[in-house]
Amino acid sequence: MALVPLRLLLDHAAENGYGIPAFNVNNLEQIQAILKAAVETDSPVILQASRGARNYAGENFLRHLILAAVETYPHIPIVMHQDHGNAPATCYSAIKNNFTSVMMDGSLEADAKTPASFEYNVNVTREVVNVAHALGVSVEGELGCLGSLETGAGEAEDGHGFEGTLDHSQLLTDPDEAVEFVEATQVDALAVAIGTSHGAYKFTRKPTGEILAISRIEEIHRRLPNTHLVMHGSSSVPEDLLALINQYGGAIPETYGVPVEEIQKGIKSGVRKVNIDTDNRLAITAAVREALAKKPEEFDPRHFLKPSITYMQKVCAERYQQFGTAGNASKIKQISLEDFAAKYAKGELNVVTKSAAKV
């Protein structure tokens, strides 16, 4: 079976009350780790690549790595998702390269640094939705800018993130605007801003409601019960991995991520896609540092790449279990992009909001 659209997995997750981790990929070992964990736990898979990852790996190499995963694990539903597309052209090039889902992040302008107006966001997102849905490809949008409620600052990920500081109104998704945005764009998923940010340095202390606004997710879900919500910047930054890295020469200061129990609260309130990258980077770094330190005479890259797969697989398997994803891959009937294009054309997948239903 070929790659499947994101909407297929999110609809199944909503019907059965679970969330799906979306793991960023850059190379062979990361893809192997994710798929090994998926097979171990019988979980559907969302692989996602940023613009930086596409540049790093190369379009052709990345495309064929994903296709190899599909050929090797045909029984696992796999989505290939463009993370943080900065402009329609980025999304269209992703679709051309076999991505079955794209994120049009219109919360920032095309420079991926300047906060955009609501009107700009609606216009570029709606444009991408019209093109993508005609091809059966899913679309994720974003409303509100990802950044810290502690400092007002953002954390750039592969060059994507606002510069300077913003106030709370820009760092938290407005529920009223969320309804208007979904009605106007018909996105398949909506990424919301609640105080999470990219990277390992999310919070200086264990997050509470004042710096991690899970309550905002609950409020948006009440207004948009039929919309799939997305949490970005949701790595938990495990203490054991930080300790292992620092034990073998690392210098990562004390920092806190998003607690798994907070993500689980979000899943109960409509979060269906949970973006995770840093946790896997930490797992790989811990494995590499440990392997090189224990056998400094080794020079075969496989000596440290094999344990990096193992350590990352463990993290992925834990998230599949914790988010309720495990056990669902075999329950999902895989459907092609062509079939989804027909469903979009017939209006079968239109998102109906409460306010639209009253009209």
Image: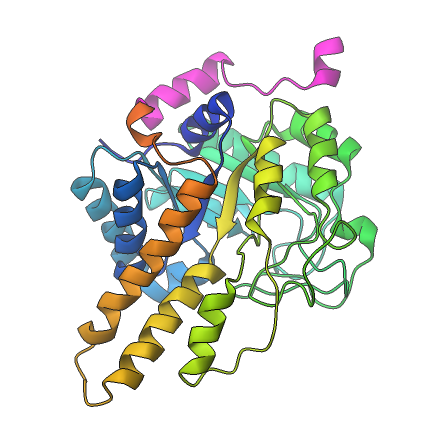
Tell me where residue 216 sits by quadrant: top right
Q: Is residue 258 visible?
A: yes
Vertical order, 46 against 309 (above or below):
above
Question: Which residue is at a point 25% across and 69% down the rendered structure image?
Answer: 305
Check if residue 336 falls in the magenta segment: yes
- The magenta segment is 332-359
Q: Is residue 190 visible?
A: no
Question: Which residue is at a point 31% across and 34% down the rendered structure image?
Answer: 77
Q: Would you say 165 lies left or right of 253 here?
A: right
Q: Quadrant of the N terminus?
A: top left
Question: Residue reaching furthest bottom?
Answer: 297
Vertical order, 116 against 227 (above or below):
below
Tell me where residue 162 sits by quadrant: bottom right
> Measured from the top left, where is residue 98 in percent x and y?
32, 42
Q: Nearer the viewer, residue 136 or 219?
A: 219
Q: Name the colour scheme.
A: rainbow
> Measured from the top left, where is residue 278 in percent x and y?
48, 62
Check if residue 26 falls in the magenta segment: no
Vertical order, 84 against 295 (above or below):
above
> Measured from the top left, where is residue 163 in percent x and y?
70, 67
Vertical order, 108 against 131 (above or below):
below
Count of labels shown? 0
Q: Would you say 179 lies left or right of 44 here?
A: right
Q: Nearer the viewer, residue 289 or 153?
A: 289
Q: Nearer the viewer, residue 256 or 44?
A: 256
Tell me where residue 222 sits by quadrant: top right
Question: Which residue is at a point 42% across and 51% down the rendered structure image?
Answer: 23
Question: Which residue is at a point 79% across and 60% down the rendered structure image?
Answer: 166
> Measured from the top left, where is residue 64 in percent x and y?
23, 51
Q: Quadrant of the C terminus?
A: top right
Q: Would you say 238 lies left or right of 113 here?
A: left
